[in-house]
Image: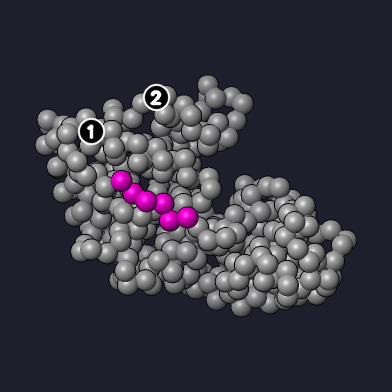
Amino acid sequence: MGNKKLVFSGVQPTGNLHLGNYLGAIKNFVELNNDKENNCVFCVVDLHAITVKQDPKELRNNIRETVATFIASGIDPKKSIIFNQSKVTAHSEAAWILSCTARTGWLSRMTQFKEKAGKDKERASVGLYSYPVLMAADILLYDSTHVPVGDDQKQHLELCRDIAQKFNNDFDVEDFFKVPEPLIQKEFSRIMSLKDGSKKMSKSEISDLSRINLTDDKDQIINKIKKAKTDPLPIPSNLDELNERPEAKNLIGIYSSLTDSNLEQSIQKFSGKNFSEFKQNLSQILVDKITPISKEIKKLLNEKTYLDKILSEGCKKADEIASKKIKKIHDLVGF
């Protein structure tokens, strides 16, 4: 793949992707896809999805919906590899081999497992505990040089780097696995619930008013922003004050991300104004940005053959790279 950066990223096929997914990841993927300095691999990580119980029919639909969302948002399947992980068997195989390199102490320090497993850790699946090793396999199979990460994934990328370095040392092969660098997301990539500024926007929250779905239409978007939680005070004039007001910070952060500005610039523009005026501005920008994506997702979901073809072609390209790497791993390990 030449001297370009190799950017790898995965998205779980959870279905019903929302504004948090778009601003936290997909918008950035589009920019990476459009940069001629990059070769991008975007993986629908269906093996990761089954760490919690899934309905098989729903999972298949969600895989297609994730691909439809990628394309509707502007990722070009001719420029990037788009595929689903389970169809490239090297991922599962590399994950097992690397789980023999990773140490249990490293995994037990992963904070995301503690958050996802909740209080009853004994009942969590082994897959949920060990999935950071599969994530490392995903990245390392493609000699990825860069991985886009949000705050919640930094620890997993550190683990991936540790696994790569230990494998290289164990088998005395300097740089066999490239040690990937993080691509830290731009300012304000973490989008919170429209109903509670302390919680991350999530499809699992009961109220649909808590999130902007990427399939929402114009009226739904306007209604959700109108009902989004704020406080009675006008928009502040400085960041310190904004940081004390989570719901206000969230809405201004969404505006900043959509307009490619920073929080200071947005505060400057709206300082002293009331939220009803700001919400009208935010609604209009969201409608302009999200409704074309929403219409395209719905259109693509009726073109299953086309989506399956993109996945099939992407799987062939991915398998060509990953199968060569796994063969070299076999040789090193002694298989």
Helix, strand or loop for the magenta stretch, by majority = strand
Tell me if mark 1 has few (under 14), some (14-19) or many (20+) residues whose alpha carbon lies within 10 angstroms of its own. few
Q: Nearer the viewer, mark 1 or mark 2?
A: 1
The x and y percentages for residue 293 are: 53, 72
Q: Is 182 included in the stretch rendered in magenta?
A: yes
Q: Check the picture and name the quadrant holding the C terminus.
A: top left
Comparing 125 with 178, the one in front is: 178
Q: Which residue is mark 2?
A: 104
Q: Which residue is mark 1?
A: 169
Q: Is residue 213 left or right of residue 131?
A: right
Q: Which residues are magenta?
A: 179-184
Amino acid bearing label 1 = Asn
**From this viewpoint, which residue is outermost toward the top?**
122
Residue 17 quadrant: bottom right
Give the answer, above or below, for where 210 lies relative to 77.
Answer: above
For the residues labelled 1 and 2, say whether their Cβ atoms are less than 8 Å apart: no
The x and y percentages for residue 329 are: 17, 39
Q: Is residue 179 left or right of residue 199?
A: left
Q: Is 56 included in the stretch rendered in magenta?
A: no
